[in-house]
Image (tube, rainbow, N blue to C red):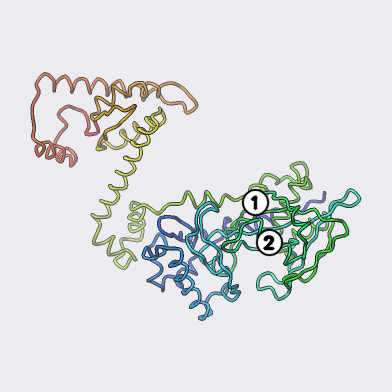
């Protein structure tokens, strides 16, 4: 097989992930507490003017929490996009479709809102579509039906394309959408669309002058009779051409092919064994870049922490005109309080994990946490229906877990942690012996004052152990 630049095919569809893109300048877009999109810096000023709809901070753009239902969110965002369309300030809205896409982080979730199709790239939200690879087999040779897009199409006019393809509009099921596109774009009858074979997905993040496009395409292969001729019915296709695999390979690496459709056909060539590790040295990279993990990308994204907000404010010299100046300047102490609250929540989550599923790895994390922060308080733990309130009880009850940490396993837990456990055990016993020999009673107020002094480092720890104990 002659060498072809297939890397151009995958990089063209994933240019947002490559150097020189706007990726590092973008802000996450949140609805409620979930990131659902990516906002480009050139688009942000147009959206943040609508302060009743969008809340802007240095770290994110967020849909107003006052908009609680799908209907409320959809209507308000539709008003914004309609207004921007009338102003003619965003090129993507020139291709207004009067068709909506769902905004969600994965297909299994309910939609947060429905957005005009031409405007979804402004929010950098995941959109879904279907692509159908039509092919025939004749004389032991596989050939593909390739479409030439209509010159009147608002996007990629006159470009080569898959035989059939279309976006997954709000309310449509995937297979129903594929059948619909086959009927409209190629006049394929039901007895043939019944033979559609789902073969997986291709995903990527593309960026162009319109916005950011994280897209997931559901793929279907359709083997057609050798004498079948597709005929367009909706005016979106100018012509169809039957191409050999060699012709197809030459076409997809050219700029005459619609970028994402070239990617889908490259996937077809890989699946059918025309592009292999033996004839393509970049095979692994090609396959990886055809399956960018969009679902986990958004699922793992969370709102930026208060600590990071504070760092950003410091980096810009604690500017008084900073967008969050009222919070950051006047509420410096409040912000640090939020940081402590976040840390407390993180600690509580760890303790809850230990209670739900006690194991050595979690106690490894607990020891690391306590070593790095001597002021960490120990919560009540419950294991096997028994409650352990004080560190002494916890140490005795969970000593086997601490001992396990010294056993060399896959994670190679260090012996130093076993030594640490033994040292702490001795300290606990010494402290407990002192208390038992000479018990004293204190009021709750006295105890709280003593803890306050200890936490502010205004009082020494007379037992020679730190506050975490």
Q: Who is closer to the viewer here, 281 or 242?
A: 242
Position above or below: 463 against 57: above
| Image quadrant containing the C terminus | top left
Q: Quadrant of residue 453?
A: top left
Element assignment for label 1 = strand
Q: Quadrant of residue 407?
A: top left
> Is 126 placed left or right of 439 in the picture?
right
Instruction: Kindly identify the residue that appears in the image at 52 percent across and 67 percent down.
Output: 115
Instruction: Kindly identify the residue that appears in the image at 60 percent across and 66 percent down.
Output: 208
Instruction: Kindly identify the residue that appears in the image at 24 percent across and 38 percent down.
Output: 375
Give the residue number, with chain letter if any, for mark 2: 259
Q: Could you give the CA–CA distance between mark 2 and mark 1, rounded to whole angstroms?
A: 16 Å
Instruction: Kindly identify the residue that appears in the image at 58 percent across and 63 percent down.
Output: 207
> Which numbered tag is attached to residue 426?
none
Relative image position of residue 448 (x, y in whole percent): 13, 39
Label 2: how many Cα within 10 Å (few below 14, some 14–19, many 20+): many
Relative image position of residue 226 (x, y in whole percent): 87, 56
Q: Residue furthest front?
A: 191
Relative image position of residue 136 (x, y in whole percent): 84, 54
> Is 329 placed left or right of 127 in the picture?
left
Relative image position of residue 256 (x, y in whole percent): 74, 65
Give the residue number, with chain letter if any, for mark 1: 201
> Is 130 placed left or right of 53 in the picture?
right
Q: Who is closer to the viewer here, 444 or 277?
A: 444
> Is 189 placed left or right of 425 in the picture?
right
Task: State yes or no: discs 2 and 1 in contact (Cβ < 8 Å).
Answer: no
Label 1: how many Cα within 10 Å (few below 14, some 14–19, many 20+): some
Please identify, in this view, whether the residue under mark 2 or under mark 1 is nearer the observer. Answer: 1
Element assignment for label 2 = helix
């Amino acid at each position: 097989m002659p060498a072809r630049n297939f890397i151009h095919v995958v990089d063209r569809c994933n240019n947002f992930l490559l150097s020189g893109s706007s990726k590092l300048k973008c802000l996450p877009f949140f609805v409620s507490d979930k990131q659902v999109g990516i906002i480009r810096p050139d688009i942000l000023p147009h959206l943040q003017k609508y302060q009743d709809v969008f809340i802007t901070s240095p770290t994110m753009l967020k849909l107003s929490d006052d908009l609680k239902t799908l209907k409320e969110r959809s209507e308000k965002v539709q008003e914004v996009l309609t207004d921007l369309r009338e102003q003619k300030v965003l090129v993507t809205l020139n291709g207004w479709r009067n068709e909506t896409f769902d905004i969600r982080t994965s297909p299994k979730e309910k939609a947060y809102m429905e957005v005009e199709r031409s405007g979804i790239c402004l929010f950098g939200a995941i959109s879904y579509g279907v692509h159908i690879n039509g092919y025939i087999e004749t004389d032991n040779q596989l050939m593909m039906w390739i479409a030439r897009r209509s010159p009147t199409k608002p996007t990629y006019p006159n470009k080569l394309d898959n035989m059939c393809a279309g976006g997954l509009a709000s309310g449509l099921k995937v297979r129903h959408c594929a059948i619909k596109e086959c009927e409209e774009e190629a006049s394929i009858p039901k007895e043939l669309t019944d033979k559609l074979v789902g073969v997986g997905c291709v995903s990527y993040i593309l960026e162009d002058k319109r916005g950011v496009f994280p897209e997931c395409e559901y793929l279907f292969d359709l083997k057609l009779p050798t004498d079948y001729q597709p005929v367009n019915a909706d005016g979106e296709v100018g012509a169809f051409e039957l191409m050999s695999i060699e012709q197809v390979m030459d076409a997809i690496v050219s700029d005459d092919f619609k970028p994402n459709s070239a990617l889908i056909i490259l996937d077809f060539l890989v699946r059918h064994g025309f592009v292999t590790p033996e004839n393509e040295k970049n095979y692994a990279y090609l396959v990886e870049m055809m399956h960018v993990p969009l679902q986990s990308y958004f699922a793992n994204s969370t709102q930026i922490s208060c600590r990071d907000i504070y760092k950003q404010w410091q980096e810009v010299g604690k500017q008084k005109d900073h967008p969050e100046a009222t919070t950051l300047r006047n509420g410096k102490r409040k912000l640090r309080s939020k940081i402590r609250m976040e840390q407390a929540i993180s600690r509580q989550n760890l303790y809850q994990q230990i209670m739900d599923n006690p194991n050595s790895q979690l106690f490894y994390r607990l020891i690391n946490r306590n070593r790095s922060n001597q002021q960490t308080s120990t919560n009540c733990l419950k294991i096997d229906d028994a409650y352990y309130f004080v560190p002494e009880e916890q140490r005795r009850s969970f000593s086997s877990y601490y001992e396990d940490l010294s056993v060399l396993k896959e994670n190679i837990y260090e012996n130093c942690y076993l030594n640490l456990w033994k040292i702490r055990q001795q300290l606990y016993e010494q402290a407990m012996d002192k208390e038992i020999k000479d018990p004293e009673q204190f009021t709750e107020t006295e105890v709280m004052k003593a803890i306050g002094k200890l936490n502010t480092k205004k009082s020494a720890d007379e037992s020679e152990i730190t506050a975490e104990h």
